[in-house]
Image: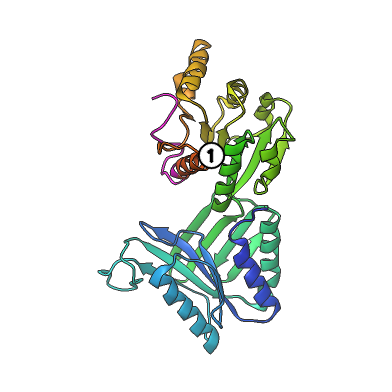
């Protein structure tokens, strides 16, 4: 089953601590503009050059890997943060990249005393749970007793007065309603993007559901009306409706209307959706409510196969996720 991408980094760190092998944590605390390393990117580097993860790649990452190795080999490691500017015209701290933007990177050599904290992080991620990671000049801390409402937060008063906090674990949830071929292709694609995936269908013996080994949960329901109580609203919740036909699509849509999600998309032809929309309008459902539904679903790339359809849907979901205002997209049920 799919695991959070950051798990492999923390597993490497945990193994190094247990084996008394010096290891450096590189962590992107903040990023601005067109920075290749985004907030929350992390990697582990050992003195021998073994590594896991990434802080953005390119010459900048190579430079920091070499810096980490040097510090570990010379035993001059200490906790420090460095801001890198991706601009040749920058007066100082040039990253070697020219993509513009900047990122602030932590270098921290893990200590034997950090083993319980790292173990708790590994356990949390392995169990698909969430918790609060804190990094500061005093080191690393973690608790699974508190789950913050934010994804990332970095505050810096002075060079040596700063705090980074992150909601560790899956930050986004994808609810796929319907378990057919398109759902299987979408599950496989979105599993690579750190989404926690739940799949719902009323056909437990469906072959494509049995083939789906990446969905974290496969839930059999007796009626799509039950989705009202099964899918909670939220700004990190993404819903894709792709059931076997328009009648079950209708049940799923009605179960989720008037609830706030980051994204709701419905797979179906324009003719089918026009028929459904006409019925909703006739019942008095407002265009404001209907306009939150993305359909035709996905970006318009003339998709033909389930895999191509999955690419178009995934691209639209990522577009919405990374937009500055939630749920904004050019393709809606109501124009």
- Looking at the rendered structure, the number of numbered marks drawn on it comes to 1
Classify residue 103 as left or right of residue 289.
left
Q: Position of residue 70 (x, y in %)?
A: 49, 84
Q: Position of residue 211 (x, y in %)?
A: 68, 44
**Magenta range:** 319-335
User: Front-most of 231 and 92?
Assistant: 231
The residue indicated by pointer 1 is 306
Q: Position of residue 55 (x, y in %)?
A: 47, 66
329 inside magenta stretch: yes
Q: Main secondary structure of the magenta part?
A: loop
- The vertical placement of 285 against 294, above or below, is above
Name which residue lies at 64% across and 56% down. Answer: 3
Q: How is the image coloured?
A: rainbow
User: Front-most of 291 and 162?
Assistant: 291
Identity of the residue furthest to the left in this view: 89
Name which residue lies at 69% across and 72% down. Answer: 115
User: Front-most of 94 and 316?
Assistant: 316
Query: Can you tell which quarter of the image residue 319 is in?
Result: top left
Name which residue lies at 64% across and 34% down. Answer: 231
Identity of the residue furthest to the bottom in this view: 74
- The vertical placement of 152 against 112, above or below, is above
Q: Quadrant of the C terminus?
A: top left
186 inside magenta stretch: no
Any part of residue 84 in sight: yes
Please tell me whether mark 1 sits on a helix, a strand or a loop.
Answer: helix
Any part of residue 149 in sight: no
Name which residue lies at 61% across and 42% down. Answer: 184
Badge 1 crowding class, 10 Å Cα cut-off, few under 14, some 14 to 19, many 20 or more, is some
């Amino acid at each position: 089953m799919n695991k959070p991408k950051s798990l492999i980094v923390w597993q490497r760190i945990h193994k190094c601590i247990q084996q008394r092998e010096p290891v450096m944590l590189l962590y992107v605390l903040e990023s601005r503009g067109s920075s290749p390393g985004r907030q929350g990117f992390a990697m582990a580097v050992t003195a021998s050059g073994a590594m896991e993860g990434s802080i953005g790649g390119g010459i900048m990452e190579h430079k920091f890997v070499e810096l980490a190795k040097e510090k570990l080999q010379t035993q001059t490691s200490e906790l420090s943060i460095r801001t890198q500017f991706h601009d040749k015209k920058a007066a100082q701290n040039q990253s070697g990249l020219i993509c513009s933007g900047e990122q602030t990177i932590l270098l921290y050599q893990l200590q034997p005393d950090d083993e319980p904290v790292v173990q708790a992080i590994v356990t949390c991620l392995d169990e698909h749970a969430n918790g609060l990671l804190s990094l500061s000049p005093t080191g690393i801390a973690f608790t699974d007793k508190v789950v913050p409402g934010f994804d990332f937060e970095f505050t810096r008063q002075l060079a040596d007065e700063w705090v980074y906090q992150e909601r560790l674990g899956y930050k986004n949830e994808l609810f796929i309603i319907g378990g057919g071929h398109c759902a299987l292709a979408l599950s496989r694609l979105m599993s690579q993007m750190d989404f926690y995936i739940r799949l719902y269908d009323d056909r437990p013996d469906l072959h494509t559901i049995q083939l789906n080994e990446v969905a974290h949960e496969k839930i059999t329901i007796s009626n799509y009306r039950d989705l009202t109580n099964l899918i909670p609203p939220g700004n990190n919740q993404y819903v894709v409706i792709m059931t076997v036909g328009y009648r079950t699509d209708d049940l799923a849509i009605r179960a989720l209307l008037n609830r706030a999600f980051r994204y709701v998309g419905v797979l179906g032809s324009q003719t089918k959706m026009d028929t459904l929309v006409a019925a909703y309008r006739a019942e008095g459902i407002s265009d404001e409510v209907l306009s939150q539904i993305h359909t035709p679903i996905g970006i318009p790339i003339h998709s033909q196969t389930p895999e191509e359809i999955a690419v178009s849907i995934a691209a639209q979901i990522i577009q919405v996720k990374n937009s500055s205002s939630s749920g904004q997209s050019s393709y809606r049920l109501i124009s």
